[in-house]
Image (cartoon, rainbow, N blue to C red):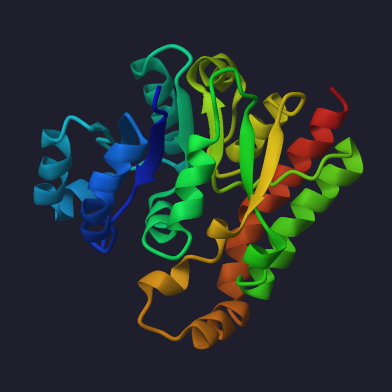
Amino acid sequence: MKPAIVFPFHDSEGVMFPHLKTITPLLKQIFSEAYLSITPITAARFPENIEFLEKDKFFNCYLFKHELPVGKQFKLLYEFAAQSCSIEKILHICFVDRLIFALKTRHGKQFVKDVASLNMGFAPIIFQRSEKAWASYPRNYYEVEKFVTTIGELVFGQKLDFAWCHLAICSTHLAEILPSVQGDDMSMMADIILLVRDKIRTQDVDWLEWEDPFFSSVGVKELKRIREESIHETQKRLSYTIPMVDKILAHRNE
């Protein structure tokens, strides 16, 4: 049985849709269906794109009527997917830009192979950024997010990417844990990992390299320099990683 793909779709500038349209035939070969949430600004600015998605039965769209905090958006999307698909369906939860990057670059074949490697009865798995993948990121991205992994390793003895980019989990298992997932920000992603920590597996992959340069007209080195010098980019990551650390420490005491 083919797995399903789940991702939020925020495309206020219309950058992602042409790419998503291009990879749709390939997605249909790999996955049985797609579940995606659509932000109000995306629907308002590009109604024709949303109409295209809604007309294709492969895409199951959850349209938000109002702007919501990102953590609430993610939880509602995951609930929608878990409740709508068949029992025991493998769900690949990810992000559209990373999905596009993986399939439209040299990583495509390995991505498809890794997705196909999971069978029924598998344990939840985080596809984590390999050291090679991490080397492509700006240093502030790496240092801030790896800090959370380091704290988790000190507390639990497990090397886990709590700010994960791609998680595969059974729909039934996801439905069971979602009521316990809290938080309005991206730290809710750590809740999910903490709730399945006793069963989780990990696999380091190169296809989670830094995807931003793929969508940018700025050169890779220059874009990396700009991001490393940006206090805003560092603060953005601290805004969800600090709560993640708090949740890890609180979970230790439960």
In this rendering, does residue 71 appear at all?
Answer: no
**Place of residue 203 in the rendered image (x, y in percent of width and height, measured from the top left):** 67, 44
Look at the picture and state if 122 lies above or below 152. Answer: above
Instruction: Classify residue 176 as left or right of residue 204.
Output: left
Instruction: Residue 104: tell me if it is visible.
Output: yes
Task: Please state the horizontal and vertical placement of residue 138, each as a whole percent of the image.
Answer: 62, 74
Q: In the rendered image, which quarter is residue 59 located in?
A: top left
Quarter of the rendering containing residue 126: top right
Q: Relative to the observer, which residue lies in front, 113 or 50?
A: 113
Residue reaching furthest to the top: 87
Quadrant assignment for the C terminus:
top right
Percent position of residue 75, x then y = 47, 30
| Residue drawn at the location 39% of the way across and 16% of the way down | 83
Residue situated in front as seen by the camera: 11 or 24: 24
The image quadrant where one finds the N terminus is top left
Name the residue located 70 percent from the left edge and 34 percent from the top edge.
201
